[in-house]
Image (cartoon, helix red, strand yellow):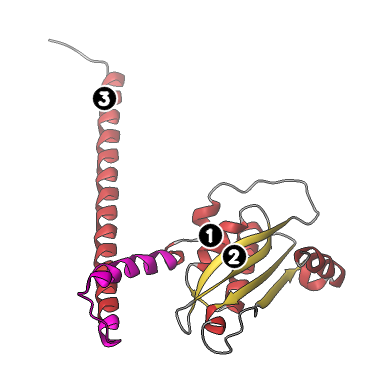
Amino acid sequence: MEYHHASDMNGVVSEYLNMHIESKHNGSSREVKDSKEAADANKLTLIEKAYSTMLSELGEDVDREGLLCTPLRAAKAMQFLTKGYKETTQDIMNDAIFDENHDEMVIVKDIDLFSLCEHHLVPFFGICVILFLLSFRIVEIYSRRLQVQERLTKQIASAITEALEPAGVAVVIEAVHMCMVMRGVQKMNASTVTSVMLGGFHDNPKTRREFLALALKK
């Protein structure tokens, strides 16, 4: 008869339990992923049908060659253009925040942004001037939603304040709105500038002027 020390048996039992727990966790993760993918596929189908209905109501023949795949392509494009609803600041920051003894201004300029006007579902695009290294990902999270520029500017500033807790945050966005270019006033060179100042940038006029001078410098 073969005997085993209690410590050996405990090790075997512990390893078995860990394998069982890991297997169960992996199975749960796969189920969640499969469920999410099924839900996304269902949403894509519904959006595709909505685009097909819209084209038909506009007087188009959705069965003609040039439009056969248009509803699906448009649905996929809309999901991409609004993917910011599924992302959070915590997701992109992760553990990428480090302490550094630096109390001067850090400015990141010319961050491209593309968004959809929530009033007409047409694009507006431009550049954002902002602080800190990871700011461009925060810009994408909030711009990939149905937006108005004023709210977008404030959301970016608030997200950076919450994530990094800096002494001050300043955000300036200059954008061209297609609802003003393609319709409405129809002015090709019209752009809109919005800004939000928080903390030291809001309270200190000298700091605010310094930022604006650097941010708006071409």
- Drawn side of residue 69 relative to residue 190, left or right: left
- Residue 197 image position (x, y, % from top left): 72, 72
Give the residue displayed 27% in from the left and 72% down from the top. 67
Spatial distance from mark 1 to mark 3, Cα to Cα? 42 Å
- Tell which of 191 and 6 is nearer to you: 191
> Does residue 68 belong to the magenta stretch?
yes
| Residue wearing tag 3 | 12
- Badge 1 density bin: few <14, some 14–19, many ≥20, Cα 10 Å: some
- Judge by depth and name the residue closer to the eye, 6 or 66: 66
Three-letter code for the amino acid on which mark 1 is drawn = Thr
Residue situated in front as seen by the camera: 106 or 89: 106
Report the residue at 59% width, 62% height from top: 112
Element on which disc 3 rests: helix
Rendered-image quadrant of the C terminus: bottom right
Amino acid type shown at disc 3: Val
Q: Main secondary structure of the magenta part?
A: helix
Image height of 62 relative to 160, above or below: below
**In the image, which residues are magenta?**
54-82
Q: Residue drawn at (29%, 53%), measured in percent from left and top?
A: 33
Q: Residue at x 48, y 67 (%)?
A: 144
Labels 3 and 2: the sequence-earlier one: 3
The part of the image, by quadrant, that contains residue 60 is bottom left
Of pointers 2 and 1, the one earlier in the residue sequence? 1
Which SS class for mark 2? helix
Counting residues from the start of the chain, the first of labels 1 and 3 encountered is: 3
Residue occupied by mark 2 = 159
Residue type, mark 2 in image: Ala
Q: Secondary structure at mark 1?
A: helix
**Percent coordinates x, y for residue 12 in the rendering:** 26, 24
Q: Which residue is mark 1?
A: 89
Q: In the image, is 1 to the left or to the right of 61? A: left
Q: Are marks 2 and 1 in contact (CB under 8 Å)?
A: yes
